[in-house]
């Protein structure tokens, strides 16, 4: 992973770089915002440690600029220790704020926590789960007990709709409208039952209940 450190104190920058390199990071260093901008565009780092007092500008403004176009994890490291400075830093888009002097161990831990939160958020936004079934809506892959399930795109969309509405009865008309035709010009009803049957076989077990005369129910407790 790549880490960009924006710090005009060359000695401090080298010390931080060395500490993170020991943990396997590839560290990039910039002493000005102009250098930082070029490295951001060229190297695409996974995280950023940002000082606020820099020769060619204010880190607060730079943080706002980065945040307006990216979710890049940003940890501010600065000598500004007033409460108002910390509030400004966090409201400008920084994920965390540490004042100097500081412990390198704490710095590492705080950045690690930011990255962990980011992974959890990313996972939560793209994954749907129910029991042993996991659906990744970003990569369009489905898994049962960690093993990928081979689904057609229609089966994938059908499973996604069930998982988005766990423990709720979905009327046949609702499913047909959502999966096949937003305008209500439905395909044959048999198309739905055939796809549900195929999906049941691929998933294993009886996770999809038929509600007679109404539609289907995905039982999350199974």
Image (cartoon, helix red, strand yellow):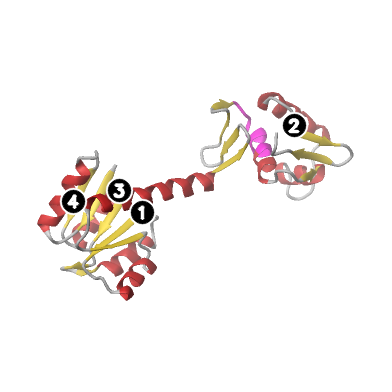
Mark 4 vs mark 2, CA separation in Å: 56 Å
Q: Looking at this view, is 51 or 101 the one in front? A: 101
The quadrant of the image that shows the C terminus is top right
Q: Residue at x 36, y 66 (%)?
A: 90
Total of numbered circles in the picture?
4
Mark 1 vs mark 4, CA separation in Å: 19 Å
Mark 1 vs mark 3, CA separation in Å: 9 Å
Around disc 1, counting alpha carbons within 10 Å, would you say few (fewer than 14), some (14 to 19), or many (20 or more)?
A: some
Q: Is residue 151 visible?
A: yes
Residue hosting label 3: 44
Mark 3 vs mark 4, CA separation in Å: 19 Å
- Judge depth for marks 1 and 4 and give the one in front: 4
Per the image, label 4 sits on a secondary structure element best described as helix
Q: Position of residue 105 (x, y in %)?
A: 25, 49
Q: Which residues are magenta?
A: 150-159
Residue hosting label 4: 16
First-in-chain label (3 vs 4): 4
Per the image, label 2 sits on a secondary structure element best described as helix
- 96 over 109 or under it: above or below: below
Residue hosting label 2: 196
Q: Residue at x 16, y 45 (%)?
A: 18
Q: Residue at x 78, y 34 (%)?
A: 209
Numbered mark located on residue 162 in the image: none
Q: Position of residue 27 (x, y in %)?
A: 21, 46
Around disc 2, counting alpha carbons within 10 Å, would you say few (fewer than 14), some (14 to 19), or many (20 or more)?
A: some
* Residue 47 is a magenta residue: no
First-in-chain label (4 vs 2): 4
Q: Position of residue 161 (x, y in %)?
A: 68, 43
Asked whether disc 1 touches disc 3, contact meaning CB atoms under 8 Å apart, the reply is no
């Amino acid at each position: 992973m790549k880490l960009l450190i924006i710090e005009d104190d060359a000695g401090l920058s080298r010390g931080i770089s060395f500490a993170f390199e020991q943990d396997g990071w590839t560290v990039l260093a910039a002493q000005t915002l102009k250098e930082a901008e070029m490295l951001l565009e060229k190297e695409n780092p996974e995280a950023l440690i940002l000082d606020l007092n820099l020769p060619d500008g204010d880190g607060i403004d730079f943080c706002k600029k980065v945040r307006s176009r990216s979710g890049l994890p940003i940890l501010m490291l600065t000598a500004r220790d007033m409460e108002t400075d910390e509030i400004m830093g966090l409201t400008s888009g920084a994920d965390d704020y540490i004042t100097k002097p500081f412990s390198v161990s704490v710095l590492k831990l705080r950045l690690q926590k930011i990255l962990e939160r980011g992974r959890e958020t990313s996972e939560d936004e793209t994954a749907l789960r129910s029991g042993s079934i996991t659906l990744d809506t970003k990569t369009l892959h489905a898994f049962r007990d960690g093993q990928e399930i081979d689904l057609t795109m229609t089966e994938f969309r059908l499973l996604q709709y069930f998982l988005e509405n766990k423990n709720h009865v979905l009327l046949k008309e609702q499913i047909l409208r959502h999966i096949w035709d937003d305008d209500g010009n439905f395909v044959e009803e048999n198309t739905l039952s055939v796809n549900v049957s195929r999906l049941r076989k691929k998933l294993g077990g009886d996770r999809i209940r038929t509600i007679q005369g109404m539609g289907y129910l995905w039982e999350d407790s199974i």
